[in-house]
Image (tube, grey):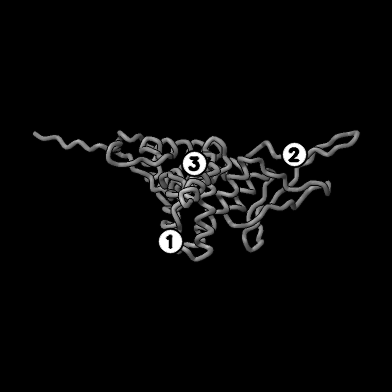
């Protein structure tokens, strides 16, 4: 009797993405998202209804890989599950950003920030500016202060890591709006980030436990691709500053 043995990951003949989630990782990601939703009072039935799938199907995505009922979750569905979970987290966040006002009797107040889309419409509001930056970036918009007692309260500046994440989200929005097919846009983003489709979501979130910090080179590759699209050119292979300098030297 001959046995057919399927090798799930061929490390020799198939190159692996830098950020790659296995079937086990995908099941874990689904379970983590469901656990977070449940902790905020959103059970499996409610989550499944929001996703437009049956509770049994949602459960099968969270089952262990070795179980008969396990099903591999589609990438877009996993994105939506994680979106539901982090939205529930931010709604329940108990540690709002607080602005200190100086003076003899120092006081703290909680400003309210709003995320606006590319047309200027308000799409969300929250006391934490990074959450609103995430929402606005994904819509090609901006963040504003819409409530604060003291007129000195402004949208706080981003640190270096947060600025890179914001640039990535903005560039990703520009790529997605340039393509008619989101799958084509996502395929390009995965190529730029050197990741698989399941890992792409992690570059865009401000929820730290699930965040993958984007690098400077990834952002530069993305912005080069956006510039090529804006000019109507084909997207050129990305070269680092060192590679460009070496190429220039070869001309002499």
Q: Earlier in the sequence, mark 3 or mark 2?
A: 3
The answer to which of 202 and 125 lies nearer the viewer is 202
Residue 64, quarter of the rendered image: top left
**Extreme-right residue of the structure:** 104
The quadrant the N terminus occupies is top left
Q: Earlier in the sequence, mark 1 or mark 2?
A: 2
The residue depicted at 41 percent of the width and 57 percent of the height is 184
Q: Position of residue 194 (x, y in %)?
A: 43, 45
Label 1 crowd (10 A; few <14 / some 14-19 / many >=20): few
Label 3 crowd (10 A; few <14 / some 14-19 / many >=20): some
How far apart are labels 1 and 2 at the CA level?
41 Å
| 118 on left or right of 175 | right
The residue depicted at 35 percent of the width and 38 percent of the height is 23
Q: Are marks 1 and 2 in contact (CB under 8 Å)?
A: no
Q: Are marks 3 and 1 in contact (CB under 8 Å)?
A: no
Q: Position of residue 107 (x, y in %)?
A: 83, 36
Label 2 crowd (10 A; few <14 / some 14-19 / many >=20): some
Of circles 3 and 2, the one toward us is 2
The residue depicted at 66 percent of the width and 40 percent of the height is 159
The residue depicted at 41 percent of the width and 53 percent of the height is 187
| 249 on left or right of 147 | left
Secondary structure of the residue carrying numbered label 2:
loop
Residue indicated by mark 3:
43
Residue 98 — which label? 2
Residue indicated by mark 1:
181
């Amino acid at each position: 009797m001959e046995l057919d043995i399927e090798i799930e990951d061929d490390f020799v003949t198939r190159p692996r993405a830098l950020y790659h989630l296995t079937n086990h990782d995908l099941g874990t990601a689904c379970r983590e998202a469901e656990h977070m939703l449940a902790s905020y009072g959103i059970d499996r039935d409610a989550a499944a209804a929001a996703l437009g799938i049956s509770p049994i199907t949602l459960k099968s995505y969270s089952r262990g890989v070795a179980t008969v009922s396990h099903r591999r979750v589609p990438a877009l569905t996993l994105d939506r599950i994680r979106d539901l979970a982090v939205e529930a987290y931010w709604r329940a966040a108990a540690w709002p950003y607080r602005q200190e006002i100086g003076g003899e009797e120092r006081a703290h107040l909680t400003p309210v920030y709003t995320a606006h889309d590319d047309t200027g419409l308000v799409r969300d509001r929250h006391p934490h500016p990074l959450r609103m930056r995430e929402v606005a970036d994904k819509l090609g918009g901006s963040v504003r202060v819409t409530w604060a007692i003291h007129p000195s309260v402004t949208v706080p500046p981003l640190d270096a890591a947060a600025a890179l994440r914001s640039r990535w989200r903005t560039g990703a929005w520009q790529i997605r709006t340039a393509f008619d097919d989101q799958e084509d846009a996502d395929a390009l983003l995965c190529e730029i980030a050197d990741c698989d489709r399941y890992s792409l979501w992690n570059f865009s979130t401000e929820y730290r436990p699930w965040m993958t910090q984007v690098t400077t080179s990834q952002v530069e590759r993305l912005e080069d691709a956006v510039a090529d699209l804006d000019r109507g050119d084909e997207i050129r292979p990305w070269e680092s500053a060192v590679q460009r300098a070496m190429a220039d030297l070869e001309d002499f």
